[in-house]
Image (cartoon, coloured by chain):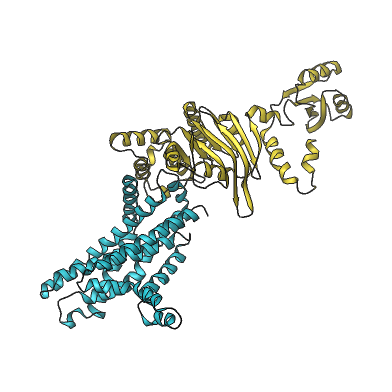
Chain colours: A cyan, B yellow
Amino acid sequence: MMNAIATIYKRELASYFSTPVAYVFIVIFLILSGVFTFYLGGLFERGQADLQPFFGYLPWLYLFLIPAISMGMWAEERKSGSIELLMTLPVSVTQAVIGKFLAAWLFIGIALVLTFPLWITVNYLGEPDNPVIFSGYLAAFLMSGAYLAVGSCISAITRNQVIAFVIAIVVCFGFILSGFPLVLDFFTSWAPQILVNAISGMSFLSHFESITKGVIDFRDIIYFVSFIACWLLANVIVVEMKKAD
Amino acid sequence: MIKVEKLSKNFGNFTAVNDISFSVKKGQVLGFLGPNGAGKSTTMKMITGFLSASSGRILVCDEDVEKKPIAVKKRIGYLPEGAPAYGDMTVVGFLRFIASVRGFNGVEKENRINSAVEKSNLQDVLHKTIETLSKGFKRRVGLAQAILHDPPVLILDEPTDGLDPNQKHEVRELIKEMSKDKAIIISTHILEEVDAICDRAIVIANGGLQFDGTPRELEAKSIYFNSVRLTVDGYPSLNVEKIIADLPCVSRIEIIHCVEDKTSYQIFSKDGTPISRQINDLAHKQEWIVDELVVEKGRLDDVFRRLTQNELDMGDSSADTSQEVA
């Protein structure tokens, strides 16, 4: 069981680095996160030794970059026909879904770790609360997993990567916005309060922000973990249904 | 080793495979014949567990494909149509991946890879990226992947498609060599291939089974089976035609061509029984100068057309081909 997951995971991870995808993604991610942190976030001007400007923009950066990674996860397999090979090897769909997800998640995690110069900068300039920064990174990693799970599932629906990209952005955008009045106002007029609360509770941002503030609440972690699990389960079902289309 | 019972597959209203049953024993090579879109690939996809059947049952090594998909997949080597692979990997990287998924590691893994590489003649391209390879090499990578774990059951969807004649020959030799202790199904529309490597043939058209037997039996269904090609000196003459056509064992005679006062006739046997002796005796008696007298084995492509087109013609009244064969 674990062996099959590990084999798929290794192949996927290696394939990111055997094509320019990995390097393009990492370079763009690092440049943009720098731009957001220093220029738009005004890291220096704020005069505070923390990484709030970085973590504040990260959800929006991920909104575009993670669907770019996830769009190929299944759409490409279906387009090239290699899904037929994969699904006739002695691996279950669940193993394939998990292996692919873990590889992409680790890859995004590597890109995230490579932002460490930011951390060095604030430590050089002042005395930041490092545990808070650490929990910020943890929150960022969990949130990237949530984006990725959505993107992976949507990638399995179509064999067209562009469609997978666009739909994944829209769905993730919905999950960012679901804590905002823009979305909530649409429901408050007719939906029961409990549903409105549930929708607002689904927002990435509220859970993300509470962890980045340094409060590692078990419920926020459970939120992300169960969110990922649900989307991966949907992913397995979609692959089962649509693999041969 | 492979047992298919009343297998059907519908895609919406379309019936791709309709109530097909057959079985393949160890040591047999079964050829799947049929026009494109006849249901060959669909049937193979169901045997390998990629598609689930709408109804019916498939047993591979006595295990039900639906109930124990992983156990069955372990026992099958499968070359899908078009030999898909991960294009960004090198050949050796790809085969290592397959070997790991198949549960091999260490020395055993390397040995398996080496032997598969050797059998499929991939030594020269081991470190090339698969997507840069020619069609023939890609096909052989797919073949290497399928035979890597030395499976008891091999399912090969058009294994020689895109190969040059030498490569075709090599692959056929390889299949023959492996067939001793395996059950093999290949699909093809190259009819000579059936003759060359299969000891059983199945013809599928429009989703249904049209024929199941040996290649010899398939040939025997040809109108050319035991027909005689006779070339005699002289221009085409109604007289020769008439004398031969009057023989009780002859159903029909045709002039094939006439070159420099030699005329070739195709003489068809009435019920597929040998007629060469009668023709020979007749030629002697009539004192024709016989240039050539050849007995035909039967033409597979002719049988193939009849088996697969009859079905197509059932709906309308166009009976061009069926009149000819009648």
- From the top left corner, tell me how far across and down residue B154 is, in percent: 48, 35
Residue at 76% x, 48% y is B315
- From the top left corner, tell me how far across and down residue A24 is, in percent: 32, 63
Q: Which quadrant of the figure contains the C terminus of chain B?
A: top right
Above or below, A77 relative to A186: above
Residue A234 visible within the image: yes
Above or below, B277 relative to A123: above
Residue at 64% x, 37% y is B203
Residue at 39% x, 82% y is A182
Residue at 68% x, 32% y is B299
Q: Nearer the viewer, residue B119 or A178?
A: A178
Q: Is residue B150 left or right of residue B290?
A: left
Q: Nearer the viewer, residue B83 or B254?
A: B83
Above or below, A180 relative to B259: below
Residue B88 visible within the image: no
| Residue B21 image-quadrant placement | top right
- From the top left corner, tell me how far across and down residue B79 is, in percent: 48, 41
